[in-house]
Amino acid sequence: MNIRRPVARINRPRPELAAPHPLPRRRIGLLGGSFNPAHDGHLAISRDALRHLGLDRVWWLVSPQNPLKPVADMADFADRFASARALAARDRRIVVSDLEQRLGTRYTVDTILWLKRHRCEYIVWLIGADNLLQLPKWRHWRRLLTLVPIAVFAREPYSYRASAGRVARAFAARRLEQRAARALAQHTPPAWVYLRLRRHEASSTAIRREQKSSGRRAR
């Protein structure tokens, strides 16, 4: 008599024991700066980034001290951080971070390297056209472009010179069309896009100038 032995199906786990589907990686835009002080222009560029780049969040990285800016004109970190948090409270998708203060990093490339080692999100660096022009002065700027995709926002009067400048020429082959901006976060760097959008005209420099002028009149 033939007796059939039971077969253990070890290759088919019970549904309730199966591993859950991994959560999709979030897409994060990083807006670094002094925020001296934070203003509506920071809010506008962040909302543009969320919309046109398909981001889940924008992190404002408040710099302890920008190496390219004078110390004398810089407000205390606590005041700048507070002004950024007060403004970001208008949009829950914007997160204000003191990461660089806690890490002690002064250069963007070091901050990005830390994030690449310790975080798993897709990251996009957000800069204005004025910073694209200034980028060759940044520490290891070529390496920075190989670490993270970059979204550049048009800003007058820098737009023409920035879009035809040294960085734009060096990485011309890695530039995406604006219509492909939503895919930038998942592109392997170097990858960058130049966004020509309506910009808010507020600037920290103009605000500080106005504050100083008002202070002189008050005295």
Image (tube, grey):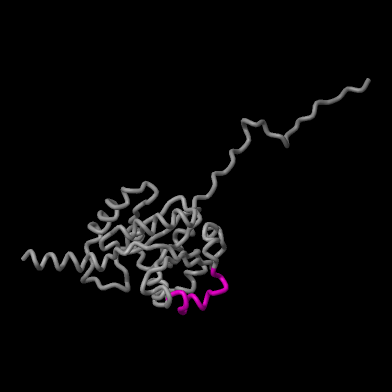
Question: In the depicted view, which residue is nearer to us: 156 or 97?
Answer: 156
**Depth check, front residue: 109 or 181:** 181
Q: What residue is shown at x 54% (from left), y 66% (from top)? A: 177
Q: Is residue 31 above or below residue 11?
A: below
Residue 83 versus residue 12: which sits nearer the camera? 83
Q: Residue 102 placed where, x, y %?
A: 33, 57
At x 22%, y 57%, the residue is 79
Is residue 138 at all visible to an observer of this figure? no
From the top left corner, tell me how far across and down residue 105 is, in percent.
36, 64
Residue 51 x, y percent position in the rendering: 45, 54
Magenta segment includes 172: yes
In the picture as drawn, the residue positioned furthest to the left comes out as 219
Q: Residue furthest front?
A: 198
Q: Position of residue 43 (x, y in %)?
A: 34, 56
The structure residue drawn at horizontal position 45% and vertical position 78%, both measured from the top left corner, is: 165
Name the image quarter holding residue 16.
top right
**Picture quarter with the N terminus:** top right
Question: What range of the chain is rendered magenta?
Answer: 162-175
* Residue 122 visible from this viewpoint: yes
The residue lying at 26 percent from left, 68 percent from top is 205
**35 in the magenta segment:** no
Determine the main secondary structure of the stretch shown in magenta.
helix
Q: Quick one: which residue is furthest to the top in this view?
A: 1
196 with respect to 24 (left or right):
left
